[in-house]
Amino acid sequence: MILGGIGCSDDDDVVVTEVKVTQDTFCTEVAKLLCRNMFACCTGNEIEDILGITISTEEKACQHDMELVCEDRNYELLDAVVRGTVTVHEQVATDCLNAMFVKDGRCFLNRPEAPWAEVCKEGLYEGNQAPDQPCFASIECKADSYCAGNQKCKALPKKDEKCPDGHCATGLSCQQPGAGGDRVCTELRKKDETCNVSMPCQAGLYCDINSGEAEGKCAPQKKKDEACSASNQCDTGYCVPGTCSDGRECTRDEQCPGKCAESQEECFSALQCPGKCSVSGDACTSPLTCTGTEETCDREECVTRCEGDRVCAEQPRKIDYCSDPMQLLLPGG
């Protein structure tokens, strides 16, 4: 969640193309950005549909309205900034907001990620309160800690410590080691270590489990254009699907309905496919229907096949300069 500071703007009616964030002016700068993009890219009742309110039709008045919306949506952080329990990273916030301005009048892009994704991925603020110091919200607490029920920051559980709420310090996972036991924080699995649903791998790895098996080994995620059978195997987060014979998308053969190898009848197993007696060649459904001594009933193979090149790839999505920054900067409702 990206949040903001306070302050009202008296700027002249000029086209805003960049902002500069300080501890006290984040919501002012957020309002300038959002109103510029809105007047360039939003259509009809889009603003009202997103925010549930009507914004002024003049850009300068819009900035006043939007600033109030920003303050309303982010009141916990604003108060924490005033009290000094949270610090806004001014340069990071400035770079993030400036990356969101619509460029060259292009309101919609088709990209795997937004142009601002990389610069905005760093935290725009950090909590200043150490464990046992007072807090009203977890955003006020330092990394790997949270605001407990007694309104004091508390460190998240470390390795081998109990985690009744399901949360652990960075790099750990809350797991139940045995049936009926307490959940404890355990290290995420490293490359080549055993993994399963209850023992997840570190970032950049995936659990390589063969079909029908309960456990696998952690392996590096695959790069673009490498073969894949599931999106979690890809560092792009997307495995291009193949196609089953019935047209449905697939990434593994077993996801498709089967067809008998010769007759092409639909099947779930070879038992549903036609058979021939091994000596006479007569049709059969079991060895008992064959007349020869020690003659077998050889059935066609039930073949499942996911056709197409299943490779890791980037998946583009619509980037909308009207709604995307608004939803990112004005959380809640």
Image (cartoon, helix red, strand yellow):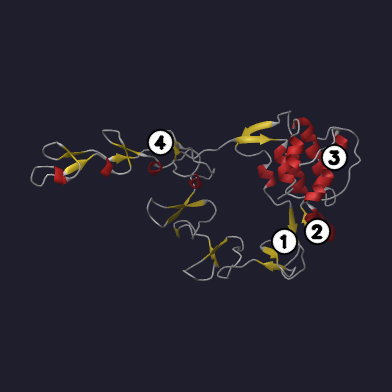
Q: Earlier in the sequence, mark 2 or mark 3?
A: 3
In the rendered view, does 104 fall on the left or right side of 232?
right
* Residue 44 x %, y %: 76, 30
Q: For mark 2, what is the residue?
A: 80
* Residue 272 x %, y %: 27, 42
Residue 217, quarter of picture: bottom left
Q: For mark 3, what is the residue?
A: 63
Measured Cα–Cα span from mark 1 to mark 4: 48 Å
Q: Residue at x 55, y 70 (%)?
A: 160
Q: Amino acid at mark 2?
A: Ala
Q: Secondary structure at mark 1?
A: helix
Residue 4 seen in render: no
Q: Amino acid at mark 3?
A: Gln
Q: Earlier in the sequence, mark 4 or mark 2?
A: 2
Looking at the image, is mark 4 or mark 3 nearer the viewer? 4
* Residue 206 x %, y %: 48, 51
Q: Amino acid at mark 4?
A: Cys
- Mark 4 touches mark 2? (CB < 8 Å): no
In the rendered view, does 36 fall on the left or right side of 315?
right
Count residues near mark 2 (Cα–Cα under 10 Å), then give few for <14, some for 14-19, many for 20+. many
Measured Cα–Cα span from mark 4 to mark 2: 55 Å
- Identify the disc placed on residue 138: 1
Residue 202 seen in render: yes
